[in-house]
Amino acid sequence: MTHKLENREGQSVPEVTFHVRDHGEWKDWTTSDLFKGKKVVVFALPGAFTPTCSSTHLPRYNDLASEFKKAGVDEIYCLSVNDTFVMNAWKEGQEAENITFLPDGNGDFTKGMGMLVDKADLGFGPRTWRYSMLVNDGKIEKMFIEPDVPGDPFEVSDADTMLDYINPDATRPREVTLFSRPGCPHCARAKEILEEKGVKYTEIPGQRTSTLRSLGGKGTYPLVFINGENVGGAEELEKYTF
């Protein structure tokens, strides 16, 4: 099925009101509240808790939020045609503290953007097509719209593409993964080193030693990867130049 997807660069964002549940109270956020006088990045995705949205699209925007801020972006909004309770639960589960979630439950904003598509074949009903945009004071400066092909394409609306557009010279935070096990003193030391350096990391506990060997490690804990590079354990991490 093909969709009539509209690039609205140079136009204003739709005038709508988002009904949100914030700290146990109902609040209305208007387009003016969200966009007036601000430089904003919006990324829209088909649904909370869905695989690509949860594993890649949302986390990377959250990880790069500080770089967007350095580039002059005031806010980053994640929009989906979901209700506010679903979006709040997803935000909490994702620990996406750097992102503001916009629940477009009725699809009003998405329809106004020309991005409302029918995903009835998946049992989703009307949803937003995946896209991202840069908005200055309510006017759309740039849109990255995923190609109209079957499935759920994810090629251009990612955080890195948007950051490259705003600031091609922006640095990227290191992607650090630490394989550990409970009660391991060397793992605790590795985490201390990373925290002392102010480096965020993803910890994956309880893997078999055979798994560590298959990843290029010695089969001992911890095993640290930085930007895909096998750094080694705590001793090697102490010597690593950040």
Image: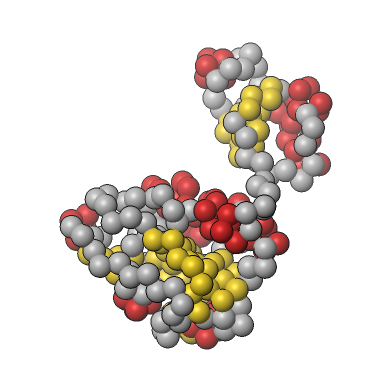
Left or right, residue 56 beside residue 171: left
Residue 189 locus on image (x, y percent): 77, 30
Locate the N terminus and report the quarter of the image it occupies.
bottom left
Locate the C terminus and report the quarter of the image it occupies.
top right
Residue 6 locus on image (x, y percent): 33, 70
Is 145 or 109 nearer to us in this picture? 145
Look at the image and tell me whether residue 89 can be seen.
no
Left or right, residue 71 beside residue 40: right
Q: Residue at x 25, y 67 (%)?
A: 4
Residue 131's place in the image compared with 102, above or below, is above
Residue 75's place in the image compared with 232, above or below, is below
Residue 92's place in the image compared with 55, above or below, is below
Is 139 or 33 nearer to us in this picture? 139
Q: Residue at x 61, y 82 (%)?
A: 37
Residue 81 locus on image (x, y percent): 35, 68
Q: How is the image coloured?
A: secondary structure
Look at the image and tell me whether residue 10 can be seen.
yes
> In which quadrant of the rendered view does residue 105 lie?
bottom left
> In which quadrant of the rendered view does residue 184 lie?
top right
Is 170 or 68 nearer to us in this picture? 170
Residue 56 locus on image (x, y percent): 47, 47
Q: Residue at x 40, y 74 (%)?
A: 8
Is 210 or 175 nearer to us in this picture? 175
Q: Residue at x 45, y 66 (%)?
A: 143
Marks counted in the figure total 0
